Image (spheres, rainbow, N blue to C red):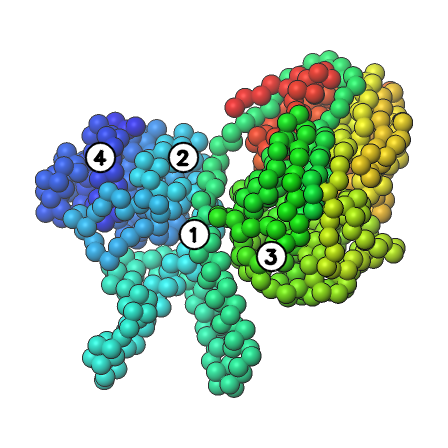
Amino acid sequence: MFEKVAFIGLGLIGSSLARVIHVNHLAKNVVASTRSQKTLDDAVALRLISKGFSNPVDAVKDADLVILALPVQATEKVLAQIKPYLGERTIITDVGSTKGNVVAAAERVFGTLPSGFVPGHPIAGAEHTGVHAGKVDLFAHHKVILTPLPTSSDWAVQKLIALWQAAQAEVICMDVKKHDEVLAHTSHLPHLMAFNLVEQLANREDNLDIFRYAAGGFRDFSRIAASDPRMWHDIFFGNKDAILNAVDGFETQLAKIRQLIENEDSQALMGLLGHAQAARQHFNYMLAKKPVMEKNKVTQKFTILPQQHRFEGTFTVPGDKSVSHRSIMFGALAEGTTHVTGFLEGEDALATLQAFKDMGVEIEGPHNGEVTIHGVGMHGLKAPTKELYMGNSGTSMRLLSGILAAQKFDSVMTGDASLSKRPMERIAKPLRAMNAQIQTTGEKGTPPVSITGNQPLQGIDYELPMASAQVKSGVLLAGLWAAGTTSVVEPEPTRDHTERMLRAFGYDVKTEGNKISLVGGGKLVGTNIQVPSDISSSAFFMVGAAICENSDVTLEAVGINPTRTGVIEILKQMGADIQVLNERIAGGEPIADIRIRGTRTLKGIHIPEDQVPLAIDEFPALFVAASCAEGQTVLTGAAELRVKESDRIQVMADGLQAMGIDCTPTADGIVIEGKGKAGDWSPIFKGAEIESHHDHRIAMSFSIAGLRASEAITICGTETVATSFPTFTQLANEAGLTIQTVN
């Protein structure tokens, strides 16, 4: 992997990594520099290095990897010494517990940071230090955080990832500031508290008795106070601001507990201790979860080359994702067998299917969109043997939260890197009001989600603070097991697939205006479900046809549930040539064929706010349509877009601006200055490389923009398209948009 590796410092961390390099034959030559000649002699005797130097300059000459394994406050001095002797492709990394001060030191030395500079932090250690304390397995199953900078080259990041993976570490990439904030709370504050507690007890006159009779809890907590004082001195100063914030938070919480004890407030203290216990159990679940490695490098790209595109044909897009999710859930909970056709075989819906398999439900398929579910009834789910992995699917996690809150067993749901950033408190809060015990992560209430089973649920009347079909559905599903009536009041109508499908499975659901109610204690009966084609997936082809001259596209059997047709109404208001044909009912859902032709230039509009919840998933594609329209398009009332798989308002604005579109994101929408002109079908967009942030709808929307681009468009992070529309590139290419895929 490396020609020459140079360690500056060879204590516990450095000598452990040197052992990894030696055992795995990762470098032809390993050298080190440290002030202790004995350390260097011992390292040579241990065959960790071939040669040792007292001067770091001698060590780094011709090295392609330099590892700074020294106290963080020494970083600037050493970098200044070795700077003239570093090559253009030398990778420089460190192992310090703070990152902001390391980066600042490097900036003072280099000015413009070298492309090979990638700070790092292995979260592993022991009480003992020195070259003899090193262990080849010190990093195994521990996390290593890399903090790539805007100047860091991808090749350098990838080589370091590979190095730490060879040490069997779990590698995560993180922002420098975020790293220092997180570590201040999870590592630096506990060490500070341990030092403080031992010092406090040592100063007591009866300290011998205190230490003699100390139990395991004291030993476990105070163990880390045996760590290297010099190192922690440097860390406490190096991460001063973040640590002081953590100390302030601890003092505030300690004062609160003190007050509860002083006032003998039994109920409040039990509540606080119980919440802390649940949070610690949740932490155990998080530790058991295999983390997702968030690399800067994408795993797939789309490229659309500039050419005279055609866009025509008759297509059947994959099944509706929302209906596919629910068909699995309700079929599993029903008595008898449910047969599903048109099931979407995308990763999101498959995550739901796998979750119910993990809970003991027998499911056959999917095969060509057909699934057979052998229901276990309302009380037949079994405890999964591991956490339920929801992948990228917020629908799965929020709806399953309602179902799992009513089960007899404990459960944990995890997701990929994108889902792990999405807010889950919006469903957790009403479920807690129903007596559920549910724990989310951090201040923003993100996954993993831990649910304690065997809690008797009570029906509630819940007013949604914002329109959300997922939250509505999660509450209603919990209501199936709750005592009494559960009602949800919507501020605006949202998709009603849950209500429709519950009725199809024989469960009575009342809808009175914006209030939906059901009584707990009933049952579901297996049935046949035909999943209509997904209108959200169809939207990309609708927009593509609307912006492409002489296009003619027909989409067959598309679901036109009235809570989902906002995209059709908005395109009609913009002047698109769009027809809804052959309307009929299938599986309780209205469907129709939709024909769109490129015969007229779109017009910019102020999108009616009553259409926003009816088109919430289709707005990225509609932003492309607005860019090709004549005049200004204004969207308001769509703050929900900021908490989807990505911040879809900002991500779309960034991409459109890179492609030459004048647009202004707002808190709850966007203003787009369309570049279209009546009768003019010439290119609108200039070429650009777009970052989709691994959001499938962003990736597909910018792909469609390629129909009106004058130069090549490259879209990064497109592998998530498979979550909702696995045949997108195939159908788009059949229609006439040539998408090149690079893995």
Query: Disc 2 designates what residue?
Result: 157
The quarter in which the N terminus is drawn is: top left
Q: Earlier in the sequence, mark 1 or mark 2?
A: 2
- Between disc 3 and disc 4, the foreground one is 3
Label 1 environment density (alpha carbons within 10 Å; few <14, some 14–19, many ≥20)? few
Q: Amino acid at mark 4?
A: Val
Residue at 19% across / 41% down in the picture? 33
| Contact check, label 4 and label 1, Cβ < 8 Å | no
Pick whichever, 2 or 568, lies toward us.
Answer: 568
Q: Amino acid at mark 3?
A: Gln
Which element carries disc 1, helix, strand or loop? helix
Which element carries disc 2, helix, strand or loop? helix
Residue 23's label in the rendered image is 4
Residue 407's label in the rendered image is 3
Query: How far separated are the C-alphas under marks 1 and 3?
Result: 23 Å
Q: Earlier in the sequence, mark 1 or mark 3?
A: 1
- Between disc 2 and disc 4, the foreground one is 4
- Between disc 4 and disc 1, the foreground one is 1
Query: How far separated are the C-alphas under marks 4 and 1?
Result: 28 Å
